[in-house]
Image: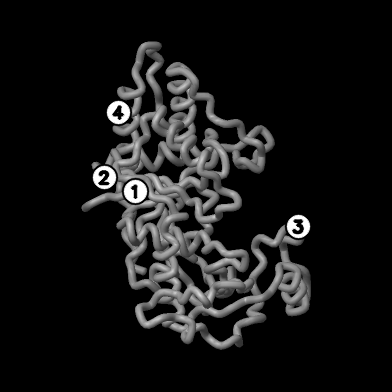
Amino acid sequence: MSYIGRFAPSPTGPLHLGSLVAALASWLDARANKGLWLIRMEDIDRERCKDHFSHLILDQLSRCQLISDQEVVYQSQRTHIYDTYTSQLIQQGLLYRCNCSRAQIWSARLASTTGSPQNTSSFAGLVYPGTCRNIPPLLESTQAHGALSEDHWLGKSFALRIKTSPQTLDWWDRRLGPGAQDVGAEVGDFVIKRSDGPYSYQLCVVADDIEQCVTHIVRGEDLADNTPRQILLYQLFQHRPPTYMHVPLVKNKDGDKLSKQTLAPALDLDSMDKIIQTMKSAASHLGLQSTESTNCSLESLLQNWTHQWSLINPLTSPPIDH
């Protein structure tokens, strides 16, 4: 079986230990299965993502000997691809315009329930109440060749949402085991294109993985709840989903996930000694052992970790037809 994996960081800052763990895990899985490992820059949000961070991340990965087997792909250069995939959803009558602000969605959701949403401190987890569902479909907004017409977007400030329906999606995670979610009930109609312009993470990641023929995804556990939405899109695009594995997160002393929001420090890779120690820390978090030899090269460490990974994380999980 052919194997294609990938690491897809958002260049909003330098890599920290948490992101290195995800990169190393995906690289080791590809190497253990004699596959390809790709790097994709998820820089579709041009306000948050910066080119100099893309260059910095690639330099950090290169110092750690984690190098893409193919040319690096940049989402900011692939809008035409996302247009085409969005047009497929429009042709199926699944997308509608949404003019609701977050405050309006919050108010409508409160009015439609007897109590308050469980998460009252954040907008996250709030199911969209379907306020704009009756707006006519966007079928008239596509050109004959299937791409979105340019004048459809200019000057527009609405989001595009996808219609969901009650349906439980099942999947298998190589580490977490079986999962299931009713996307319509637990997530609702989610955004495909934001009102401020960029396409959503859900649409872009599925389109990119299909276009790059990605077969296996190894990523951080914080992204596990995205899986059912992405499987739903795979179904709508009539494409088999990849195999998923979500690895443990690196957390700070307060128990929070290491991230730019929690001020995670950038990797210190100024010398080979620091690189090796940093890589050993990442490998240890993944349950891999390191030699104590002071003169052990990074190449030999990576070879040893690849062997250990193949023993600890074999591709033996039962496949699921979606």
The residue depicted at 53 percent of the width and 29 percent of the height is 267
Say whether marks 2 and 1 touch (CB < 8 Å): yes
The x, y position of residue 215, in whole percent, is 32, 55
Give the labeled residue for mark 3: 121
Q: Do the residues labelled 3 and 1 touch (CB within 8 Å)?
A: no
- Which residue is label 4 attached to? 303
The quarter of the picture where residue 158 lies is bottom right
What is the C-alpha distance between the residues marked 2 and 1?
7 Å
Q: How is the image coloured?
A: one colour
Residue type at mark 3 is Ser
User: In x, y percent, where is residue 11?
Assistant: 52, 44
| First along the sequence among labels 2 and 4 | 2
In this image, 192 relative to 265: left or right?
left
**What separation in Å lies between label 3 and label 2 (alpha carbons)?**
43 Å
| Crowding near the residue tagged with mark 4, few <14, some 14–19, many ≥20 C-alpha atoms within 10 Å | some
| Residue 153 percent location from the top left of the image | 54, 73
- Pick whichever of labels 4 and 1 is earlier in the sequence: 1
Between marks 3 and 1 in the image, the one whose residue lies nearer the viewer? 1
Neighbour tally class for label 2: few under 14, some 14-19, many 20 plus, Cα within 10 Å = some
Which numbered disc, 3 or 1, marks the residue that appears first in the sequence?
A: 1
Residue 141, labelled with which disc?
Answer: none
